[in-house]
Structures are given as structure tokens and as C-alpha cells.
Image (cartoon, helix red, strand yellow):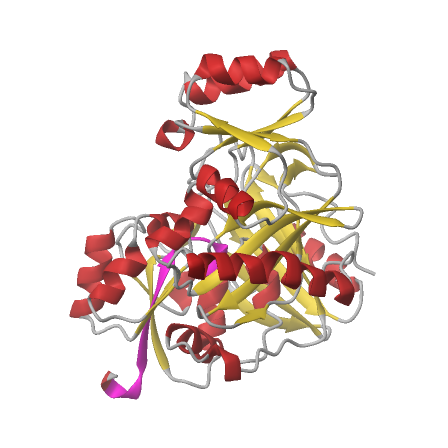
């Protein structure tokens, strides 16, 4: 470490990576933070590096040349193409699972077959790469059905079909029209499960694991969870529907068999494992796995982290997680996403973002005893101005003991303006 500062590279450009950078900045370890490619908000606490998240060679060359001490991978794409394997082979420390482990997210077919092999409950399913075979299958199946592109689709590759006609339409759009490109070369058709959904994240070093606090995210674009699927329009912690008993059952019936199964497959899983679950009566089913921090759940979770996040990352990489104390405060938290109008479909960018003169542009500030955070997601700085640069633009987060944290984030949402600004009005209504 040059100048006694630890050099940390955070890969990604969203709100999740912005929140990770702030948690790193809070560490008692002195750091020099780089974000690749970063965003407008990252520039206030880090050095943005103009290397795309999927340019593994460029990222590796940069890390070696600049003697990066630790790399943290935010999004799924670099993990799915083997960035952890490349960095580890080059003798660099990296937080995130290897390419084989990343198949749990990058191939829904692999994930479903894995669950079946290790007797972990999941919805009945079949995989197809041939349209006529898929059409024949759905013709004779009771609806609704769930149809998924097998590959990565930024949270937008899942459809619930109400009848065979709609199923045909969805299958054609994925397999023939190639709306997800290579990610849609295989589809997974699942039985529909009714129940309540739950995101559950743990960190593991391949030997032991530690659960993060529970969270609930809001996936649909519209109030009351209606309309198109998105990458996530908001999140709260803790999940108001989750008991200690349910957490124990999830660990025993999902997390532990999954980690054991990975070991049997010869995979040492290091990083975050995110299980998308559905609870139906007494049964817990796995809908999907992600192999990284969720977005925007991470933003709501990390503002409550009291432990040192750099120590967490290093204990995972060095396989010392067992003795690490993962501590969160006892607040409630909320994250509200401000999006570009038209998201998750067509939207325009490049609009100036105007912040009220009483607001900081990014980072942590305090008002009336409530801690507020503004994390940037799809933003850039051009000519000294913040401009919109993505579908999800800003994340407004707050934590506290009272329900007024919901009023707080909505109050701040009104103090920020950009053309076509859109956000849901019901994020946090479940907090009590």
C-alpha cells in the first residue's frame, strides 16, 4: 500500500456501487477509491476510471498498473464473464464469485438444474431452445405460467403469462425476435407460485456465511406493484413480513444446502449470494439466485452497517469470515428510486438535474435528526452540471426509528428536479 492508503477499485456505475463507495469511505482504514466506470456521484469521493465493466482485460491492466489492493465487483456481467478468475490468477484480491459460481445467475437453466439436483425447493419447470417444442408444452399447461430468458436480462427477463396465446407471444419475442439477444437463446418455463416474495442475502467465504439484514424490494414500475418489471424501484429494511423463525428455516432449507451443493460441484463461492424466494404456506421456494449485492436493496442495507466493510471484504477474500462480527444498527431504512420517464422501456437522458439549494448533491447529510443519503445511479457530470444518464437516476435513502423516514425521502424527492422525473409513491408504506 503506497502512502499507507489502501487502493480499492469498485466496478460498476449504479446506485449500488455508489453506496458501496460510501461504506468504504466510512472505514477506519484510509483508502484511495477508484470507480470503473463510476457515475456523477462517484466523482465526489472517488476517482472515476473510464473503463467499461465488461472490459476484463482493461480492468485487470489498470489494477496491476495501479497496484490495486482490493477490487469489489458490483454488477453481474463482469462476474459472469470470469473477472474473479482473471484477477485471482494474476494474484489480485477480488470480492465476488468465479465464473462457474456465477452461472447461478447467468444461466437460469443451470440454476434450476442445480436446485433440482440438490433437492432445494423450486417451482416445477422445463427448459427449451426450440420454439415449437416450447409452444406445445405451454398449450397443455394450466396458466398462469412464468416464462424466463435463461441468461442475464437486467431484471427484465421474467414474464407472467395468463393464457396460451400470451405465452406464444412471449416465447416468439424471446426465441424468434431475440429481444434479449444471446440471453434468450434458452427459455425456462415455470409453474406459477402464489405467495409472498422475499430477497435474502448472505456473504460467504466458501467455508462459513453471515446473513445480511432482511430487506424488501419493489420490482414493478407502478404503485401497488403493477406494470412492467424493473431493476427495482425502491427497498426497505427490515422486511416487515420476516420472522426469526423464517430466517432460520431459510438458512437451513436454502442457504446451507446451496453452499454444500456448490462445494460438491467443486466451487469455492466467495462473495454475496442473493436468493430470490417465494414463501407459500410452510414452504420456501427459490425463484432465482443472484451472485452479487441486490440493487436497490444494498443501498438500504449498507446505510445501517456498523461493521467495517473493508474488513468484511478482506475476511471473505482471505477465508476468515467465521470470526468477523457483522453488525447493523437497529434503525429502519428506506431507498426510493428516481427514474427517467419511460423506464424500463424507452426513455431519454441528458437532462439537467436541479438540486434544491438546501440539498447536498450527493452523499450523507442530516436534517431534523434523520440521516439522509443521495446515491447517484444513472448520472454524469458535463460542463459542471449533473445530467441524467440512465433509467434509474438517483436513490434517496434515509434511516431512523420512526415511520417519518418515508416522509423524509419523499420530501427530498420533491426537492430534486429533472425532465420526465418519475418515482413510485408507495415505497415504505409497509414500515410501521
Position above or below: 228 against 171: below
Query: Quick check: 243 left or right of 393?
Result: right
* Outermost bottom residue: 4
- In terms of image quadrants, where is residue 68? bottom left
- In terms of image quadrants, where is residue 406? bottom right
Please say whether residue 143 is one of the residues in the magenta stretch: no
- Judging depth in this view, the residue of 108 and 415 nearest the camera is 108
- Chain part drawn in magenta: 3-17
Residue at 42% across, 37% down: 151
The percent position of residue 368, horizontal first and vertical second, equals 73, 73
The percent position of residue 73, horizontal first and vertical second, equals 38, 60
- In terms of image quadrants, where is residue 152? top left
The percent position of residue 216, horizontal first and vertical second, equals 68, 54
- Judging depth in this view, the residue of 117 and 333 nearest the camera is 117
Please say whether residue 6 is one of the residues in the magenta stretch: yes
The percent position of residue 432, horizontal first and vertical second, equals 83, 61
Position above or below: 62 against 150: below
Residue at 22% across, 65% down: 89
Confirm whether residue 358 shows in the render. Answer: no
Query: Quick check: 430 left or right of 250?
Result: right
Amino acid at each position: 500500500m503506497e502512502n499507507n492508503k489502501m487502493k480499492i477499485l469498485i466496478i460498476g456505475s449504479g446506485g449500488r456501487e455508489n453506496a458501496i463507495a460510501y461504506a468504504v469511505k466510512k472505514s477506519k482504514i484510509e483508502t484511495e477509491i477508484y470507480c470503473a466506470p463510476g457515475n456523477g456521484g462517484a466523482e465526489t469521493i472517488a476517482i472515476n476510471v473510464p473503463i467499461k465493466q465488461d472490459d476484463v482485460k482493461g480492468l485487470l491492466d489498470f489494477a496491476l498498473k495501479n497496484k490495486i489492493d482490493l477490487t469489489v465487483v458490483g454488477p453481474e456481467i463482469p462476474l459472469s464473464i470470469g473477472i474473479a478468475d482473471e484477477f485471482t490468477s494474476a494474484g489480485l484480491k477480488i470480492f465476488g464469485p468465479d465464473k462457474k459460481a456465477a452461472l447461478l445467475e447467468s444461466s437460469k437453466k443451470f440454476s434450476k438444474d442445480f436446485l433440482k439436483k440438490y433437492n432445494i425447493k423450486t417451482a416445477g419447470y422445463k427448459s427449451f431452445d426450440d420454439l415449437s417444442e416450447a409452444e406445445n408444452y405451454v398449450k397443455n399447461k394450466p396458466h398462469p405460467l412464468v416464462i424466463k430468458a435463461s441468461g442475464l436480462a437486467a431484471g427484465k427477463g421474467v414474464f407472467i403469462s395468463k393464457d396460451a396465446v400470451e405465452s406464444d407471444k412471449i416465447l416468439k419475442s424471446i426465441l424468434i425476435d431475440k429481444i434479449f439477444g444471446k440471453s434468450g437463446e434458452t427459455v425456462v418455463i415455470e409453474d406459477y407460485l402464489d405467495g409472498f416474495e422475499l430477497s435474502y442475502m448472505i456473504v460467504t467465504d466458501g467455508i462459513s456465511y453471515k446473513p445480511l439484514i432482511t430487506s424488501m424490494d419493489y420490482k414493478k414500475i407502478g404503485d401497488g406493484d403493477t406494470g412492467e418489471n424493473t431493476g427495482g424501484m425502491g427497498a426497505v429494511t427490515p422486511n416487515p413480513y420476516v420472522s426469526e423463525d423464517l430466517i432460520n428455516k431459510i438458512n437451513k432449507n436454502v442457504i446451507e444446502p446451496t453452499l454444500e451443493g456448490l462445494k460438491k460441484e467443486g466451487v469455492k463461492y466467495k462473495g454475496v449470494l442473493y436468493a430470490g424466494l417465494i414463501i407459500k404456506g410452510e414452504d420456501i421456494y427459490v425463484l432465482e439466485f443472484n451472485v452479487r449485492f441486490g440493487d436497490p436493496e444494498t443501498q438500504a442495507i449498507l446505510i445501517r452497517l456498523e461493521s467495517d466493510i473493508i474488513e468484511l471484504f478482506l475476511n471473505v477474500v482471505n477465508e476468515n469470515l467465521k470470526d468477523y462480527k457483522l453488525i447493523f444498527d437497529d434503525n429502519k431504512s428506506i431507498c426510493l428510486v428516481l427514474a427517467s420517464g419511460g423506464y424500463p422501456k424507452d426513455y431519454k437522458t441528458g437532462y439537467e438535474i436541479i438540486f434544491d439549494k438546501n440539498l447536498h448533491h450527493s452523499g450523507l447529510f442530516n436534517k431534523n435528526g434523520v440521516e439522509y443519503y443521495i446515491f447517484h445511479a444513472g448520472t454524469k457530470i458535463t460542463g459542471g452540471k449533473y445530467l441524467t444518464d440512465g433509467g434509474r437516476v438517483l436513490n434517496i435513502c434515509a434511516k431512523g426509528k420512526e415511520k417519518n423516514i418515508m416522509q423524509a425521502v419523499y420530501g427530498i424527492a420533491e426537492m430534486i428536479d429533472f425532465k420526465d422525473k418519475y418515482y413510485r409513491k408507495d415505497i415504505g408504506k409497509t414500515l410501521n
